[in-house]
Image (cartoon, rainbow, N blue to C red):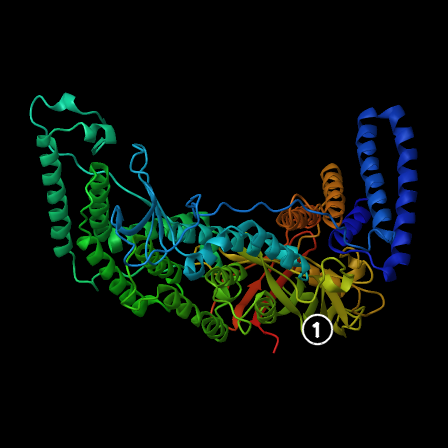
Amino acid sequence: MLAAFFCLGTVYAQVKITVNQQAELQQSINDLKKEIRDLENDIKETEKTDPAEAASLKKQLSALKNMLAMIDNIGKPSAQSSKTPVTKLPAVKATPSPIVPVIVKQTVVIPTEAQAKDKLLWYTGKKINDSTLVTVKGLLVQYNKNNKNSSLVKIQPPKKSDPFDRIALELTKLEQRKEELAEKFDKMKNGFMFYPDLKIALALYDDLNQRLSEVVKNTIDLPGMLMPVEESGNSSSRTGARGPFLDYFDTDAVQSQNEIYLKGMNETIEQQLALAKKLYNELPPISDFPAPPAHELGMCANCDPELIKKQKKQDSIWFVNYWGKEERILQIVLGVERQRALLGISESDFSSASQVLKRGVEKSRILFEKYGTDLTRSQVVMQVVLGVERQRQLLGFNDTDNFNGMLLVIKGMDVYEKYLYEQMEAKNHDFVLNLGSHLGFLRQKALLGASEERDMDFASLTKRITDYNRFELIMEVDFIMEERDGNNELTFKATGAMATKGKVYGKFVPVDCSYKMIPFNVDLSDTKLQDVYIPFSVKSGVKTLIDENGKLVNYNYSGPESFSLDFPEFKFDFCYNNKPDTAWLLTFMGDSDPGDISEGMKYDVYKNYKSDFLTFANLVFVSRDLQPNAEEFTDLGQDVFKTIGGFQQTNTGSSMVEKLKNQYEGKMKMDEHRKGIQNLVNDKKSMILFTANNRSTVVADQFTDTKRKLEEEGLDLTRGLIHLRLLHSPVQ
């Protein structure tokens, strides 16, 4: 029963039954029904003599019945199963906009220069009401100075001429764009197997939304400022609120201050402005700033949470070093403007802030010239350059210097496609195969409005990556078995050499932060047996034994020309770590079971070398001396068939992303159960250790020799050579 269970379990765990397999499948069903009937009879007899054994048999019976139901269901074609179920998913919610609306009741009319005589903070224009002003350029500013808890200035540039308005609108469509991307994966062949890439892409979508939301937000949070030192006895003349560093006061307190206090406030304001000018004069040369941190663009950096966290921390530290001193000056000036507004002082001195912003423009130009086309630093550069432009816009500064940060950033993105081609030529598999990173770049272009019809889109990108993602698997097996007598004289010898037949291609699919390899053209929704097997040709083989005259006689191999090997289980990455890359190999399969090695096999009465060849070849891989635990085997078998059903009857989940996740995790779970059965049957699979080579045509070229003494067989495996090669062989 266990042998049949294993056979069915491994086949159906990997293969979806097709029409041309119905006859074979029906025979398996009939055999299984007979086995169930026999087991039911055994249980009736065993219950009388050994209840404990009967309970164990009942568990096996339950497993067989479950397996029968599952196989029977798989084998029945139906109109319902032949169509992908269509499930209407709930509407995707919009992401909150980073734009805080400026609400006014009346129609906004842009004033002329002659009409623009009012002041609100440092802005000049025409007031719509006490807290709202519109400038001659159509900048709508709102700040309620009479609200003692308000420190927020809301600024709304004219929508038609605001390059950031379109970005803000696209940011609100984050969840919609995620679902659209997932739908594209769903339409790909084996798209669910690339769910880890989708997961990386969605994380990059979130990161871009966070970065650009900070850039395009239309509010300025005005800081407080240090208060003047009071003369003794005056502390009761005002009210305030103390923070950990600053002493704040409210509007009512300001209105009740005496002349001495107002004089002190003016002195403090002058001191703060003097400090701002002093700090500006102490700034280092404009080009004296550190290089932005470089981000790794390969799979390892994009899927490791610790590396991502480290990168974000490095970005934050760099921002402080790059703009921290200038930002302090701006905060001082903005704090002064807030206090002047609270005091009802219309005078404004924004010269230090103006100098800082002009410096920011020049600094952005230098930053872009140095690093704007360096893709490892592009996101940081984008955030800084666009941030300076947006800050100037919101603060109401003119654009007479012809600075356009948006065009600079878009220009920098033009190099991406060229860089991708260069890395393809350089065989940089870690970068090229990181589909999630490329999709993040496409999202960045879409957010900035940089996409054009001639540019790379999802379809053209995935086509290029799919064509690139083809690798040839070449394997050779070479063995020598010997038996010697007490005098070390040769009494038996068997040799064999095998190699993969024809071209065997595979592709890499992501698993966590690593890759596995599957057959290149396999369709996991309609897989045939031959799709998951690798054909091997027998190149040579000679069996030597002593004849009845005591002489050594050679018999050339005359059996089948080829055998099959299950596709190896690979796990590897291109990361710089100490983890070895692995390939697990199972045994060869033929049309018949060669049986155990015996004297009758070694000294074959027919004087030929046929069926025993496969037995010797498989000894290169595993030990044959294993009796799997029946109960554990049964449990794993049930798990396999449960997950087959879950994998084929796709659970859509609450979204397309959830559907792909469920499909992917179901397939991974099914594979784990299948491996569990294989591990029970083959306790000593051959594991080949290698180091996957990036930037090379030869990803792996590894020799492994499993030579050892085979005690129970009474043989020495003097050579058990396995040669594995992985060669990059893209579709031309």
Is residue 370 among the parts visible in the rendering? yes
Q: Nearer the viewer, residue 83 or 674?
A: 83
At label 1, counting other C-alpha atoms closer than 10 Å, the crowd grade (few under 14, some 14-19, many 20 or more) is: some
Tell me the SS state at disc 1.
Answer: loop
Q: Relative to the observer, which residue lies in front, 154 or 288?
A: 154
Numbered label tally: 1
Q: Amino acid at mark 1?
A: Lys
Is residue 553 depicted above or below 29 in this figure? below
Residue furthest front in the image: 114
Q: Which residue carries the number 1 mark?
A: 501
- Image point 72% across, 72% down: which residue? 537
Q: Is residue 39 above or below residue 19?
A: above
Q: Is residue 312 left or right of residue 87?
A: left
Left or right, 427 with respect to 331, comes to right
Picture quadrant of residue 687: bottom right
Q: Quadrant of residue 282?
A: bottom left
Asked whether, in this view, residue 611 is left or right of residue 242, the answer is right
Q: Nearer the viewer, residue 250 or 455?
A: 250
Q: Is residue 243 visible?
A: no
> The C terminus appears in which quarter of the rendering?
bottom right
- Quarter of the image where one finds residue 571: bottom right
User: Is 119 displayed left or right of 299 in the figure?
Assistant: left
Q: Position of residue 353 (x, y in %)?
A: 21, 53
Residue 681 x %, y %: 71, 48
Residue at image point 10% right, 28% down: 230
Q: Looking at this rendering, what residue extends furthest in the bottom direction? A: 732
Question: Residue 74 placed where, x, y %?
Answer: 83, 50
Classify the position of the N terminus by image quarter.
top right
**Front in this rendered view, residue 562 or 191:** 191
Residue 209 on image: x %, y %: 46, 52
